[in-house]
Image (cartoon, rainbow, N blue to C red):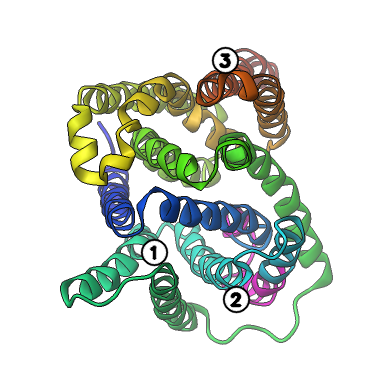
Amino acid sequence: MISKHTQLTIISRAILLLSNFLMIVYTTRCFGAEGRGVISYVLACVSIINILTNVSGGSTLTYHVPKFSTKELFTYHLFLSGFFALSGTLVMSIVTNGKFWSYIFFISLGYAWVNGVANIFLGKKLYVTYNALVVSLSVLPLIIFSILIAINYTLTLELYFYCMYASLAVLSIVGFVLMLKICGWPEAMLDTGKWKKLTMYGIKNELSYLLQFLSYRVSYFFILSKMGYSALGQFSVAIALAESIWVVSRSMSTIHYTDVLHSANMMENRRKTHRQALKGIFLSFLLAVIIFFVPSEWYIFLFGENFSSVKYLLTYILPGVLAIAFTNLHGHYFSAKGDQNILIIKSFIGLAANVVLLSLLIDTFKINAVFIATNVSYTISSVILAYYFYFVDRKRISCNS
């Protein structure tokens, strides 16, 4: 059976996915493939920066909830999230010649703050509050955008990003008030040793996430460079649909992560990880089958004629996505143990495989090169993680028992 907390998280993630899907439909209809390509580009940059901001937020905060006071974590996150968001935006501006820097900075800052607060609640096992904040990140912009559509307001890309600003501002205020209720005002000072410990863990943890994210999204930059915003817009829609099957394994991973954090029974943690992974891949496979059999005409109806290739793109991405769905639980198990080395190794190898294959094949095979690189990358990283869990980690724990 799936626990009630996992069921709540799956339902919340399903709402989040539906909200994202509706926003994709709105934006493809309003702005076309090129406009959707711009949005995907900005959000990809935001995601890279948020990996940096998660050095002081994200799972770094969740991991340390049992080890530090809430006030200490609140203080740490409050002071450093803005610093990392600004630093990341400056770096991305240099790399991308300053394109859309204001959108990237304000959205990165808002996401960093709200996600950090949500992860503190996750570490405290306050799942309702955690899920409410995470879901609101997608639902609130959708509500604002829907209202503008309903009143026939003239829609522009700039207005889309302003909707994001407004929703993130509201959620940031809500998050701040919630934190004040549970721990009071942040401290003026925090012990230097604790700052260092938190930061060193965060750097190591986010290095694995950075490599993983680049492995997932490095193809965006190759597509943009070789085929333009329109092709990127179409591919990003297909990827979003394919990765929707991760809703089950990621929801299960979120709850399992906190369970492992608060448990000292390593053998039982391993057994639970294995059982949850099997449940996750079974349910993910069912979702993949449903997505596979959706007629291509439906995608054209939803997204427009410019997205007639979505079904084709989606079909060839699914195998690699399923491989990741199986090992999501294993990755969170190692993360909860503080064993980031294997996560860094598997993500680096997956990224290297993706970059090498894209560099060699994309000029000749175009979008087909992306299918090959993505599936090989995802499969290699999943095989490495599964091997380490079922052979290396099992032997190590058996020797220590």
Q: Predominant secondary structure in magenta?
A: helix
Q: CA distance from mark 3 to mark 1?
A: 36 Å
Q: Magenta segment: does it hold 67? A: yes
Q: Is residue 17 above or below residue 174?
A: above
Query: Which numbered disc covers residue 137?
Result: 1
Which residue does the image show at 25% across and 31% down from the upper left?
Answer: 1
Q: Is residue 334 above or below residue 95?
A: above
Label 1 near label 2: C-beta < 8 Å?
no
Which structural element holds mark 1? helix
Residue 99's x, y, as percent? 64, 63
Horizontal arrangement in the rendering, residue 176 relative to residue 204 (left or right):
left
Which structural element holds mark 2? helix
Q: Of 222 and 20, which appears nearest the observer? A: 222
Which residue does the image show at 27% across and 47% down from the upper left?
Answer: 14
Q: Of 164 and 110, which appears nearest the observer? A: 164
Query: Which numbered disc covers residue 385?
Result: none
List the residue tagged with mark 2. Answer: 71
List the residue tagged with mark 3. Answer: 390
**Which amino acid lies under the numbered mark 3 shown in the image of this protein?**
Tyr
Q: Quadrant of residue 202?
A: bottom right
Q: Quadrant of residue 134?
A: bottom left
Neighbor class of circle 3 (other Cα within 10 Å; few <14, some 14-19, many 20+) is: few
